[in-house]
Image: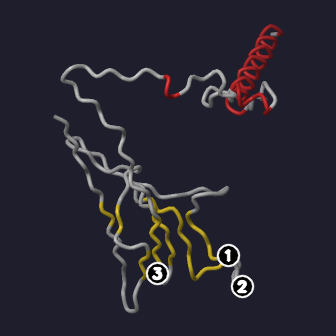
Amino acid sequence: MNNARSFLWIALAALGFLLWNAWQNDYHRAAPLAPPSQQASLDPERPAQSSGADLPAADSAPAAAVADGAVEAPATTPEPAARIVRVVSDVLELEIDTRGGTVSKANLRAYPVQAGTTTPSVQLFDPAGEHFFVAQSGLVSANSAAPDHRAVFAAAQDEYRLGEGQDRIEIPLTWIFYVLSFT
């Protein structure tokens, strides 16, 4: 009878260890190994700061040789700059980024943060800050190119307002797809 009790205590200890180990894997935050001043140089995503003395000059780089009959690809064309389109209705105030058609800000105009005061209105979407929230969308096509959340759209105006007696506002965002061919 004493043997069964010993095995149960050992099994309980083993389960406790496994539970503690799983919790450590899920929630344990590792302390940084280096001080913050040295950590930037150890980060593989960011190149280390250098004085520039060990880098070759740009004009000393060899020119790219183009094979006979080959066409050299042009430098990347700059994308059009994204703009912010402001939309104001009787209830909402929106900001739509033309990059991807993203709704980046949304405020409830008639609803202050503190009821009965003139505090700022309730903010639903916020592109910065501790409560980051934006609404992104995009299309996917199996047959041809389609605008995604990085595509730059064109808008006819910078601001749209709901007129008196209107029920809705239409904000047309246009995406133009260019096909470049080289011969």
The location of residue 90, given as percent across then percent down, is 48, 84
Q: CA distance from mark 1 to mark 3?
A: 19 Å
Q: Residue at the far right: name it.
A: 2
Q: Please name whichever residue, 56 or 90, is drawn nearer the observer in this view of the structure.
A: 56
Q: Name the residue: 49% across, 71% down.
A: 94
> Which badge, 1 or 3, is on the more N-terminal residue?
3
In the rendered image, residue 29, in percent from the top left (x then y), is placed at: 74, 32
Using the rendered view, name the quadrant where residue 114 is placed. bottom right
Mark 2 surroundings: few (<14), some (14-19) or many (≥20) residues within 10 A? few
Task: Read off the residue under disc 2.
Answer: 117
Find residue 104 and name its label. Answer: none
Tag on residue 89?
Answer: 3
Q: Position of residue 138 (x, y in %)?
A: 36, 52
Instruction: Look at the image and name its color scheme.
Output: secondary structure
Q: Measure the C-alpha gap from mark 1 to mark 2.
A: 8 Å
Side of 75 where 28 appears, left or right: right
Residue, far bottom: 165
Per the image, label 2 sits on a secondary structure element best described as: loop
Checking the image for residue 113, the label placed there is: 1
- Looking at the image, residue 130 sits to the left or right of residue 63; the answer is right
Q: Quadrant of residue 117?
A: bottom right
How far apart are the two marked residues, 2 and 3, measured between alpha carbons? 21 Å
Q: Amino acid at mark 3?
A: Ser
Up-down relation of residue 31 to residue 12 (above or below): below
Farthest residue, direction top: 3
Q: How many marks?
A: 3
Q: Amino acid type of disc 2?
A: Thr
Viewer-side label of 2, 3: 3
Q: Secondary structure at mark 1?
A: loop
> Which badge, 2 or 3, is on the more N-terminal residue?
3
Residue at the far front in the pictured view? 59
